[in-house]
Amino acid sequence: MSTSNGQSPRHAAHFGGSGQVPRTPQARQRTSGTTRPASRMRPQAVPGSRAGSTGAVGTRSALGSTGVSSRTAQATRRAGSGNVRKRGKRGRASALPAIVAGVIAAAAVIGLVVLLVIPRLTGAGSSDADKQQITAGQVVEVTVPDGSGASAIAKALYDAGVIESKSDFLNQVRRTNSELSLKSGTYSLVTGDSMDNIIQLLSTGPDSTAATLTIPEGFTVAKVASAVESQFGISADDFTAQAKASNYVADYPFLAVANNDSLEGYLFPKTYDFSGKDVTSDLVIRTMLSQWQTEMAGVDFDAAIASLKSRFQMDFTQEDILTVASIVERETNSDDDRATVASVFYNRLAVGMPLQSDATTAYYKGGDFSAADLKDDNEWNTYTRTGLTPTPICSPGLASIQAACNPDDTSYYYFFISGDYHAFSETYEQHQKAIDARPQ
């Protein structure tokens, strides 16, 4: 799968590998050759066996969301006066043109409603011409001049790279009846944040952003530390040093399964308000862990573990599921795809195929990586090793966690995602054709 860097949106996602291509995942024979990077949407073959994998990660079991017409009235009057004239076939036929004209007029009105009114009410049929790719997770300053309407605000957000689409933003503003609530001023906003969060901040006013912290889905602990430093002046190094599972497991028992003493995956993505509080690293971390606990109250991990074992004949832990969710988060930006992408990863785990996710190497490198990095054998390289990474690679949102708990039932082992083009395949040959068929 492919991603241009460790934190940016997924421009493409597909599996690749090296050497001779096994035609089915069940072939389970690893081949040799030179591994090429899967980024930039370049297809590669996938090794398909447990054998030949070097340095499998640990011993974790998983590793190895009515009126009356005028004509009728006239007839009635004639009947009452005794002056009734019988109408023959020609008289009846003369009404046909009027009926046809009425039907045509009604059809025209319905057509206008379907083509013009409904799309404006629902946002359907909007053009994608204004859509752009953005780099998520960057804090930018946006100034909304006095008197700016929703369209001007949408343009300011679009130009600053905060939103991908002006029309999508305006549609959400209309749906939430927020046109008159948006306030002028200077805001600190996070690129790629949800429309609802952005609209809420713009409706509350610029002063509200001084004490808020917005953490988008897909942020790592390091990115959270950077955002805390930018917003509150707390050293990123101090935050990272404090962000250890051992410091909080006594108050948050769910951290008992956290590997590497890491809080990766547990700092829940959300916009937090620290107004009137003395903000410290400890306060931020506890607030985010409490939010994770609240959000997960509706997620039945035990049921998910049992279901996954039945489906894939493998033992999983809560940490394993969260790790899958984190990779899903980094590999797709559409809720519609998450459960299907999750199924691809579980299908690969079940037959011993490497996950081959560029996102895991991007995490290890802290961002951009090279083709040579995909050959560097380490426990985060899902090209050279089978199974899952030691910890999650980011903080997934609730949608990705739900997808990892309940993946779609598919026979897919490959996927390719580039912008609005999404393709899932069972075989490598189908995968190659899907890549070749992508819009240019």
Image (tube, rainbow, N blue to C red):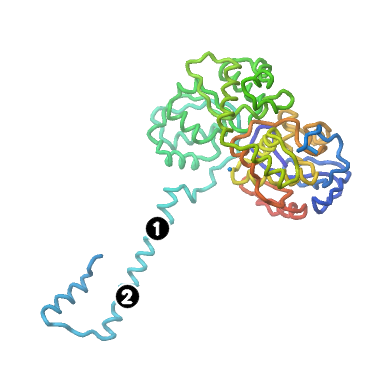
For numbered disc 2, what is the local secondary structure? helix
Q: Is residue 319 above or below residue 338?
A: above
Quarter occupied by residue 109: bottom left
Q: Is residue 184 above or below residue 93?
A: above
Q: Nearer the viewer, residue 246 or 22?
A: 246
Q: Nearer the viewer, residue 200 or 162?
A: 200
Quarter occupied by residue 339: top right
Q: Nearer the viewer, residue 152 or 12?
A: 12
For numbered disc 1, what is the local secondary structure? helix
C-alpha distance separating marks 2 and 1: 23 Å
Q: Quadrant of the N terminus?
A: top right
Percent x, y of residue 163: 54, 36
Residue positioned 80% across, 31% down in the render: 379
Percent x, y of residue 117: 40, 52
Q: Is residue 27 above or below residue 293?
A: below
Q: Is residue 178 left or right of residue 407?
A: left
Q: Nearer the viewer, residue 155 or 301?
A: 301
Quarter occupied by residue 207: top left
Identify the amino acid type marked 1.
Answer: Leu
Q: Is residue 286 left or right of residue 60?
A: left
Of the two numbered discs 2 and 1 on the same chain, state the one appearing first in sequence: 2
Percent x, y of residue 181: 39, 32
Label 2 crowd (10 A; few <14 / some 14-19 / many >=20) = few
The disc placed on residue 232 is none
Percent x, y of residue 93: 30, 81
Residue that badge 2 annotates: 97
Q: Is residue 123 left or right of residue 76?
A: right
Residue positioned 54% across, 24% down in the render: 213
Identify the amino acid type marked 2.
Answer: Pro
Residue that badge 1 annotates: 112
Label 1 crowd (10 A; few <14 / some 14-19 / many >=20) = few
